[in-house]
Amino acid sequence: MLINLSDVFKEQGKVMKVTTPVEMNAFRLGQKYEIIEKNDFEWTLTNIEPGRAKVEGKGRISFKAPCDRCLSDVKVDLDLAPERFVVPPEKQSDEDEEVDDLSFLEGYELNTETLLYNELMENWPAKILCKEDCKGLCPVCGRNLNEGECGCDRFVPDPRLAGIQDLFKRMKEV
């Protein structure tokens, strides 16, 4: 959804509050994640000085994503609160360090979907787990170990002791 910022840029001290729906139904980050719940986002647009505005948002988006250990579906809730400083197109320059990436601005209009997509990328969890002590999958047979043991021999010898293991094997041959 696009929000026109021209009034906010022009009028000193102007504060504008806008509520927008989240239009995206999925999020792509290597793979596609389905959005299962989304709330309307509350935006506050504030003129902080001539030709400079602050964009603040608040809302929640929930996804369905696989657990990083056992691959079972997990509901991921992300409370997002984007905060960006923006300037009108005629004042944008590469030297302005205080202004954030403005890929979500289209002229004088704020593209809330692009801003939310960027915010999702920044806040995506490093690891998604179904529970803190998830046991994952058996590396031999692939069974979900949270549902019970499979009985496979999962012993992995320490590679630093491979030389000693070879020595014992040679001694058995003699």
Image: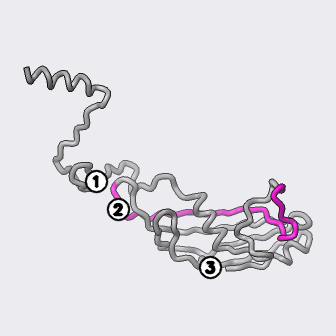
Q: Which residues are magenta?
A: 70-96
Queried whether the magenta region covers residue 73, the answer comes back as yes
- Which mark is drawn over residue 21? 3
For the point 46% across and 69% down, the residue is: 32
For disc 2, the marked residue is 72
Distance (Cα) linking label 3 and label 1: 38 Å
Crowd tier of the residue under label 2, counting other residues whose Cα lies within 10 Å: few below 14, some 14–19, many 20 or above: some
Three-letter amino acid code of the residue under disc 1: Asn
Three-letter amino acid code of the residue under disc 2: Ser
Q: Tell me: residue 99, above or below residue 155.
A: below
Queried whether the magenta region covers residue 36, the answer comes back as no
Q: Quadrant of residue 89?
A: bottom right
- Which mark is drawn over residue 93? none
Q: Earlier in the sequence, mark 3 or mark 1?
A: 3
What secondary structure is found at the residue carrying circle 1?
A: loop
For disc 1, the marked residue is 146
**Where is the N terminus found, in terms of image quarters?**
bottom right
